[in-house]
Image (tube, grey):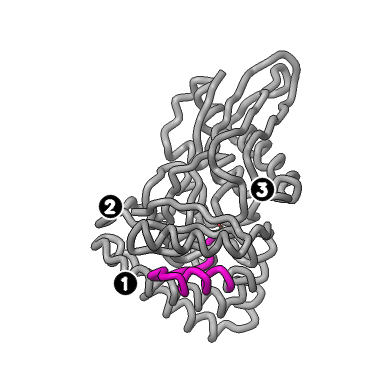
Amino acid sequence: MGSGKGYGKTILFGEHFVVFGLPAIASALGSYTKAEVRVVEGKGWEVIDQRLATPGYKEKKYDEAMQSIKNVIEHMNIDVGCQKLEITFSGDLIAASGVGASAAQATSLARAINDSFTLMLDDEKINEAAYEGEKAYHGTPSGIDNTASTYGGLIWFVKNLKGGKNIIEIPQSGKKMPLVIGNTGITASTVEVVADVRKLKEANPVRFEKIFSVYHSLVIDAKVALLEGDAISIGKLMNQNHKLLQDIMVSGELNDILVDIALTHGALGAKMTGTGRGGLVIALAENEEVQNKIANAIEAEGYDAWKTMIG
Ligand code: MEV
């Protein structure tokens, strides 16, 4: 048997912008998906999905998950004509829109296959296999989710739009900061939302150019603030990033409601994270007391809230 982990992620800055070659910053979460691969008699593969999930998530993503698993197996050249893979997914990452659940699944599978067949692949190759899996979920993923899932920690990521190597830096943050993740409970389709943004951009090129330019200086400032551990500036920049995401029409009503709850309960900054139109929001807190306050306020309104540290 082989096993492997893929970490969940949260995008601190730059979802959607990253698809167009702008830099983005993500942080891997401590929670992960674990894959176990057993080679048994037969052919093909079978999945036992024991991950905890937001209601409806697994059903909505079922076809994409099956295609993703197929992509990873094929990319890794595993012959399933004369042997069968029994694949079990588990772990403490709750599968939800926005937490990098698809990337964590693909990464954990790539690592488990690597382990099971003693392929000796390095992280770069694992990341490439996980990216193939992500294609089933995103169509044309930027690659930031699988990169955060593979490498862990903080990631500065710039997609190479010409198809060459992406820029991946692992900055060392000045300090660990408490974060709250609020779950709208809505599962969004990344393919659809990414396609909508592209259409909107094509219809409004000048407006998008301005938004991209504002975002570009924002993300440079965010990198500096993260390196310095300057939580106040990071919070302000998160708020500005959320406004830009509203401008490109990817924040949903519930995202905005959860962001407001977080801000009125002391968050230094808050924004939607990931695909948007549902999924998750993140809120930065100056200490654990405020973190608890924000999480309790979100839960009091009937939404799940998780606490983690970034940096
Ligand atoms: C989804 O987690 C992040 C998006 O930017 C899509 C991508 O980067 O592929 C919306």
Q: Name the residue carrying label 3.
A: 136
- Residue 299, relative to residue 9: is it above or below? below
Q: In which quarter of the image is residue 310?
A: bottom left
Cα distance in 3D space between marks 3 and 2 = 32 Å
What are the residue bounds of the magenta stretch? Answer: 257-274
Amino acid identity at mark 3:
Ala
Q: Which quadrant does the N terminus fall into?
A: top right
State the image coordinates of residue 298 (x, y, percent, origin top left): 55, 63
Q: Are marks 2 and 1 in contact (CB under 8 Å)?
A: no
Is any part of residue 68 visible from this angle? yes
- Closer to the camera, 53 or 155? 53
Image coordinates for residue 47, horizontal then vertical, percent: 70, 31
**Eyeballing the image, is 66 above or below 87?**
below
Indicate the quadrant where residue 24 lies: bottom left
What residue is shown with label 2?
A: 172
- Residue at 38% across / 52% down in the picture? 309
Number of dots carrying numbers: 3
Observer-nearest of 247 and 169: 247
- What residue is pinned by disc 1? 233
Q: What residue type is labelled 2?
A: Gln
Residue 232 x, y percent position in the rendering? 31, 70
As drawn, is 47 to the left or to the right of 291?
right
If the image is split into quadrants, where does the C terminus sit? bottom left
Which mark sits nearer the N-terminus, 2 or 1? Answer: 2
Circle 1: element type? helix
In this view, the residue farthest toward the bottom is: 206
Mark 1 surroundings within 10 Å by alpha-carbon count, few (fewer than 14), some (14 through 19), many (20 or more):
some
The disc labelled 1 sits on which kind of residue? Ser
* Image quarter for ligand 1: bottom right
Q: Which dot, 3 or 2, sits closer to the camera?
A: 2
